[in-house]
Image: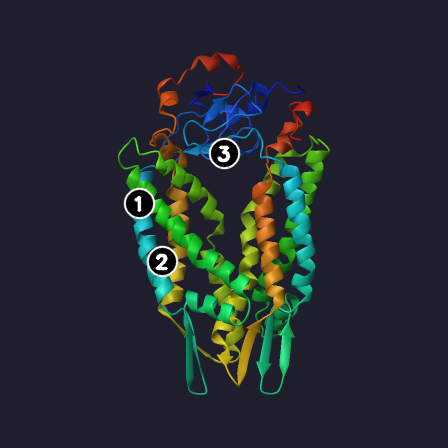
Amino acid sequence: MSTGVPTGITSGFVSCEACGLLTKPVNVHEPGHCPRCGGKLELRRHNTIQRTWALIIAAAICYIPANVMPVMVTSTLTSVEEDTIISGAVLLYKYGSWHLALIVLIASVMIPLAKLAALAYLLITVQRNSIKDQRERTRLYRLVEFVGRWSMLDIFVVTFVVALIQLQPLMSVKPGLGSLFFASVVVLTMIAAETFDSRLIWDSSNCKEEQND
Amino acid sequence: MSSSFIEDIVACPGCDLLQRIPVLSPGGKARCPRCGHTMAANKPDSLERTLALTVAAAITLVVANTTPLMGISVVGRHVSTTILGGVLEMWLQGQEITALLVAFCAIVAPTVYIGLMLVILLAVRRSPAPSWAGFLMRMLDLSQPWGMAEVMMLGILVALIKIAEMATLVLGVGIFAVGALIILIAAMMASFDHNEVWTRIRWVDEESQKMIASAELADIEGIRP
């Protein structure tokens, strides 16, 4: 122990993630179930590092087709036009609503990318047992958790444009395959943020041998 | 298996620091001294207020899902859509998985969240509440991040701007209901006190509840008051 701060892991206590009850099980590594809510007790989320890595790698792969493939296909009498997320934002800019274009660009392009980078950074620093900037990293994690849902924005935009613009044969809008990949990125990064255990950020200041896996 | 546990000391869910929650004045908050996580908050009248907000949210939810959000008029044709209409069109146009996801985030998750909240709050009105309320609490926490009414609202607004270039828009009742729903759900979350609800729920393992021992307290030294 490098610091004398009492934590659950150093004192043999397991905290229930659902109801918050603190339990001292006979065997900390097989704590069983919470006597209050019946939920499964875990000292740290099971295989959290591997699972979070797997999820963000999958999300990073989906991120490419999500931005390259069209999310919306507009057909008129004379033409067929395919829009990716970025070209959709450019179109909004041309219509004169640059602030909405900016929101779409931030929510759809920047946030998923920033989320992937932030989670990768958190995982790497945890794996290297870094004890620097723990408070800031915890804040970063909370930001990632909070902001992730906003990336669904473009999916909702596509849904409602598609629902209304069905004026065959004059004009109709179909959703593109890009929307599926895009939705996958959002879901995968949201699950990745839920899978990561922020207590790992602080574990390196207790005892390096006690690290999760 | 015999476990021992203590009720007045908790480990921070963010960083695992053991600490004792002080008595809070109404409106007061306790934060983890190490990572800043909000450990507890004294929310006056939490159960009653949240119940009132939840009932209002349930009514608004029905209105938001049954009335048209918006419509357009082009060359004498009028088309309008509800939330479910958007999902249905997505499905019909060949993006079934995306359609299901939209349905989940826009309709299912908020409905489950509001429904569970209603049942939990009614169940804990008499203490101790049956232990299945604890199971519902776990489901409530799971459903919460997937309810995206506010994201949907912004999505509707962006869609409106895009469409306004092509056709005349007519706003429906639904869009105002969604706006009200966002505020009500946010207020529900703010006034809901997890800790208070958990203390009112009967334990799954009732034997353990009876033998709460504070003997373990002596084991840990240096815990902040």
Binning the other alpha carbons within 10 Å of mark 2 as few (below 14), some (14 to 19) or many (20 upward) gives many
Q: Do dots 3 and 1 share one subunit?
A: no
Marker disc for residue B61 = 2
**Residue B51: image location, x then y, percent:** 31, 45
- The chain carrying label 3 is A
Chain letter of the residue carrying label 2: B
Q: How does the figure colour the protein chain or chains?
A: rainbow
Q: Residues at badges 3 and 1 in contact (C-beta under 8 Å)?
A: no
Q: Amino acid at mark 2?
A: Leu
Q: Nearer the viewer, mark 3 or mark 1?
A: 3
Q: Position of residue A182 (x, y in %)?
A: 61, 60
C-alpha separation, residue under disc 3 versus residue under disc 2: 30 Å
From this view, report whether residue B47 is shown above or below residue B33: below
Give the residue displayed 41% in from the left and 28% down from the top: A36
Residue B151 got which mark?
Answer: none
Which residue has dot 3 on it?
A17
Residue at position x 71%, y 31% from top?
Answer: A129
Q: Quadrant of residue A27?
A: top right
Q: Position of residue A138 (x, y in %)?
A: 60, 37
Residue B51: image tag: 1
In which chain is the residue bearing label 1? B
Q: Is label 3 or label 2 in front?
A: 3
> Is residue B160 visible to us here?
no
Image: B224 above or below B137: above
